[in-house]
């Protein structure tokens, strides 16, 4: 097997959240082999940096040579580089490689990671292909105060002109506002990228991971703009999945996208098995209402960001005229079915719901649910206010939550004018769903 190789140069974070380990994780997450040269060992955790042990410039040079003499290093990402001597080594040995420079002037806790800013500007920044400052870093590099997107543009232009960096990416996370606005300048035009702000406390290593993704994607042959676009999308998942693993600011998770994609594959497999189960199970048609059934099944609930992470059968679970049950079409993610919307609303209320199905209402079935140990709640749909199609599932969950403070596994209603009575049932796994449906069919003798 062959893989492209990208190199990270920076500090070692004992907490695995930023620096070299996060760089290599980020590179590996997009299928690039990451190699690394260490400038300093930090004793660090989510609460901050305690001590820094610098590596001698000579030993840094030795690491770089060992790497360069053996691997075809396509791109380089730099982070913590302490002093002028280290910077000279990096510049002398790597000036010919496309470098993505993350100007980590200060760590989250305020510790200086680039000890000599003047040396950094003159020795390293001038060799960068791409530089990725956040707002405080862009202020330090440009000497401009940044309070608005307009200021970011001015700073980006100034950094480009002063240090001849071909592509300057000023990340807007530190500015106020509902949207995060990144400003990109390449010497002739601006690109302004806007993203909805993600509420997240655990953002340690965001800058390291973003710059490493850019370097890795460029190593794979993407041009700077394509790499930027992809890295921006991936970093959102990494931030969204920020890890609560210490007492302080936890790290972002560069593995998030890979894990979500792997889970989605498993969801498809399990739904295929579920389709076989309902098509083969004797008497299954008895559970299917006139409006037909569907199954919603998502990735692990705490990874669910929206309907894009929940799958339902595009053609539903159909009871045919002859009593056969057919799942005619494959599952799809992000399809706004009733069951998908209901499962999403239940997850958003904090339940570890993984699978949900609607089945026909029958008072005996409700009794069996109770007998096998599920919490059951009845909802009176005549109380539903008039609102458009697409609002019902959200209303249902709000209504149940306001009455009970949680969402029981079984929610049923006896219908209303023009609305068929229905049981909606959620479980923590698809296996539990199948086992429970089996029990219903065994116990129910209509
Ligand atoms: C070794 C090392 N490199 C980079 C950072 C910056 O990351 P952050 O800004 O999240 O503290 C860090 N804390 N440690």
Image (tube, rainbow, N blue to C red):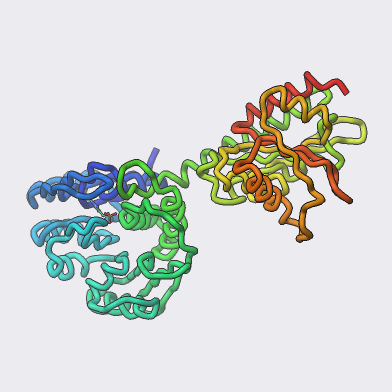
Q: Residue at x 25, y 74 (%)?
A: 164
In the visual, does 352 lie left or right of 446? left
Q: Residue at x 23, y 50 (%)?
A: 48
Q: Quadrant of the C terminus?
A: top right
Q: Quadrant of the N terminus?
A: top left
Q: Residue furthest front?
A: 403
Q: Can residue 63 be seen by looking at this rendering?
A: yes
When the figure is inspected, residue 429 is found, relative to residue 379, above or below; the finding is above
In the visual, does 76 lie left or right of 336? left
Q: Residue at x 38, y 41 (%)?
A: 2
Percent coordinates x, y for residue 50 in the rendering: 16, 47
Q: Residue at x 20, y 62 (%)?
A: 95
When the figure is inspected, residue 127 is found, relative to residue 26, above or below; the finding is below
Front residue of this view, candidates 366 and 281: 366
Front residue of this view, candidates 420 and 430: 420
Percent coordinates x, y for residue 411 in the rendering: 72, 39
């Amino acid at each position: 097997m062959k893989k492209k190789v990208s190199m990270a140069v920076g500090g070692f974070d004992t907490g695995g959240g930023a620096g070299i380990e996060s760089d290599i994780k980020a590179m590996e997450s997009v299928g690039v082999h990451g190699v690394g040269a260490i400038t300093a060992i930090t004793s660090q955790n989510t609460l901050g940096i305690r001590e820094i042990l610098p590596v001698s410039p000579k030993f840094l040079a030795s690491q770089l040579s060992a790497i360069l003499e053996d691997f075809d290093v396509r791109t380089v990402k730099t982070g913590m580089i302490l002093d002028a001597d280290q910077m000279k080594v990096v510049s002398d040995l790597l000036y010919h490689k496309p470098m993505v420079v993350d100007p980590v002037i200060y760590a989250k806790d305020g510790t200086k990671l680039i000890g000599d800013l003047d040396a950094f500007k003159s020795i390293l920044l001038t060799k960068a292909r791409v530089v990725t400052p956040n707002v405080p870093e862009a202020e330090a590099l440009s000497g401009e105060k940044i309070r608005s997107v307009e200021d970011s543009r001015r700073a980006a232009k100034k950094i480009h002109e002063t240090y001849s960096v071909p592509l300057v990416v000023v990340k807007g996370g530190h500015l106020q506002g509902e949207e995060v606005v990144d400003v990109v300048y390449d010497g002739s035009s601006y690109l302004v990228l806007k993203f909805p702000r993600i509420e997240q406390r655990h953002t340690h290593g965001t800058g390291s991971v973003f710059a490493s993704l850019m370097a890795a994607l460029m190593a794979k042959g993407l041009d700077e703009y394509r790499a930027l676009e992809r890295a921006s999308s991936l970093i959102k998942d990494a931030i969204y999945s920020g890890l609560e693993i210490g007492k302080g600011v936890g790290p972002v998770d560069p593995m998030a996208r890979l894990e979500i994609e792997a889970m989605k594959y498993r969801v498809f497999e399990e739904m295929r098995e579920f389709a076989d189960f309902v098509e083969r199970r004797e008497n299954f048609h008895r559970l299917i209402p006139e409006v037909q059934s569907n199954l919603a099944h998502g990735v692990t609930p705490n990874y669910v960001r929206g309907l894009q992470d929940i799958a339902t059968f595009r053609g539903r679970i159909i009871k045919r005229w002859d009593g056969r049950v057919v799942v005619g079409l494959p599952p799809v993610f992000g399809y706004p079915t009733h069951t998908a919307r209901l499962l999403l609303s239940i997850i958003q209320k904090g339940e570890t719901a993984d699978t949900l199905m609607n089945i026909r209402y029958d008072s005996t079935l409700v009794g069996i649910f109770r007998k096998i140990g599920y919490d059951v709640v009845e909802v009176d749909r005549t109380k539903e206010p008039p609102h458009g199609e697409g609002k019902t599932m959200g209303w249902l969950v709000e209504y149940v939550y306001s009455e009970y403070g949680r969402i029981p596994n079984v929610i049923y209603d006896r219908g209303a004018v023009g609305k068929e009575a229905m049981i909606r049932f959620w479980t923590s796994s698809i296996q539990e769903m199948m086992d429970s449906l089996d029990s219903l069919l065994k116990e129910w003798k209509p």
